[in-house]
């Protein structure tokens, strides 16, 4: 079973750390004045509108009033997401580092994107320009469509996938990662962990045989539902759907209930070396 419905606190933390998706029947709804924001015309030059933790809105078109409404809606979702994670996984209280909030008003299906940006291909998340240096990527999603579900597929367990692809990957020479940081191509220096995670992300998306033949399971998120998972271990592809909100949190591995289940520790065991 990949999805778990509204578990109690101990089991939610264990489910998330075990690579499951925790689903909640609701809890976040748009306000009446926000309904009209569900409009792909508000996107400007990107697939998502984003709000940074320091409250800068990016990739949003529209008047100052519309942009203010977007900001208010996204900030409200960010607060909801934190309250929700802290309620279902109290173990993480005080340790969650807030990342970006995103609003996704475009239909996924049929969108033209380059292979590496194509989230309809199964992948684990890794941020090319924002290395996490081992921190977990925990994401909260809400389907705010009036009625249509959002469709994902999920794949095999992380360790099975990593066992298949890790032998072909080598971390960058440290000098290259230092250079990326020095020229501002990355925020902070990439670690070997970041190299391997991005390597897995890219290798998966570029491998049509794996995409076609790997184990897959459909996941449907009905309009109104909220779901939470560690997208650095859950192999996922978003196939179809429109109008979602998403909040990213980073969590230090030491703040997990079971740090050994982190991709950092899994990859360190598999490679026999320290990766951060
Ligand atoms: O938009 C979605 O439903 C998920 C897309 C995705 O793969 C991601 O945000 O990491
Ligand atoms: Fe993803």
Image (cartoon, rainbow, N blue to C red):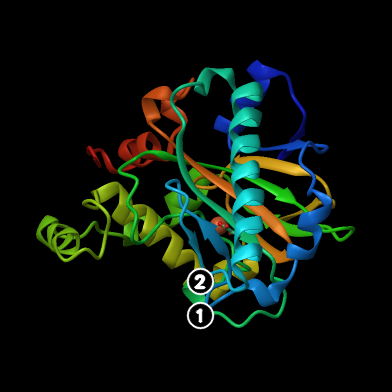
Measured from the top left, where is residue 196 in percent x and y? 33, 54
- As drawn, is 25 to the left or to the right of 275? right
Q: Can you name the residue that lies furthest to the left here?
A: 175
Rendering quadrant holding ligand 2: bottom right
What residue does disc 1 label? 114
Alpha-carbon span between mark 1 and mark 2: 5 Å
Q: Quadrant of the C terminus?
A: top left
Instruction: Please tell me whether mark 2 sits on a helix, a strand or a loop.
Output: helix
What residue does disc 2 label? 117
Question: Is 18 above or below relative to 51?
Answer: above
Which image quadrant is residue 60 in? bottom right
At 40% across and 37% down in the image, what residue appears? 266
- As drawn, is 46 to the left or to the right of 166? right
Number of numbered discs: 2
The residue nearer to you, when weighing 261 against 112, is 112
Measured from the top left, where is residue 107 in percent x and y? 73, 72
The residue nearer to you, when weighing 190 against 181, is 181
The residue nearer to you, when weighing 79 against 215, is 79
User: Assess mark 2: CB under 8 A from ligand 1?
Assistant: no
Which image quadrant is residue 239 in? bottom right
Residue 216 visible to the viewer: no
Residue 75 visible to the viewer: yes
Residues at marks 1 and 2 touching, judged by CB atoms closer than 8 Å: yes
At 36% across and 42% down in the image, what residue appears? 267
Q: Quadrant of the N terminus?
A: top right
At 25% across and 65% down in the image, what residue appears? 185
Measured from the top left, where is residue 173 in percent x and y? 14, 59
């Amino acid at each position: 079973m990949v999805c778990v419905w509204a578990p109690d606190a101990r089991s939610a933390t264990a489910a998330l750390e075990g690579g499951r998706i925790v689903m909640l029947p609701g809890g976040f709804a748009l306000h009446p004045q926000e309904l009209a924001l569900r409009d792909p015309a508000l996107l400007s030059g990107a697939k998502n509108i984003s709000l940074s933790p320091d409250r800068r809105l990016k990739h949003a078109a529209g008047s100052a009033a519309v942009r203010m409404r977007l900001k208010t809606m996204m900030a409200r979702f960010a607060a909801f997401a934190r309250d929700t994670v802290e309620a279902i996984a109290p173990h993480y209280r005080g340790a969650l580092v807030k990342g970006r909030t995103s609003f996704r008003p475009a239909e996924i299906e049929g969108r033209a994107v380059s292979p590496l940006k194509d989230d309809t291909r199964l992948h684990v998340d890794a941020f090319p320009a924002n290395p996490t240096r081992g921190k977990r990527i925990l994401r909260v999603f809400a389907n705010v469509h009036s009625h249509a579900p959002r469709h994902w597929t999920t794949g095999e367990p992380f360790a099975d996938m990593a066992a298949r692809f890790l032998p072909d990957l080598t971390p960058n020479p440290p000098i290259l990662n230092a250079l990326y940081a020095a020229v501002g191509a990355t925020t902070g220096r990439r670690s070997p962990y970041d190299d391997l995670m991005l390597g897995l992300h890219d290798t998966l998306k570029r491998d049509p045989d794996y995409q076609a033949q790997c184990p897959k399971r459909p996941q449907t998120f009905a309009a109104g539902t909220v779901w939470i998972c560690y997208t650095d271990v859950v192999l996922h592809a978003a196939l179809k759907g429109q109008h979602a909100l998403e909040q990213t949190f980073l969590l230090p591995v030491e703040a997990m209930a079971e740090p050994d289940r982190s991709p950092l520790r899994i990859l360190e065991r598999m490679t026999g070396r320290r990766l951060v």
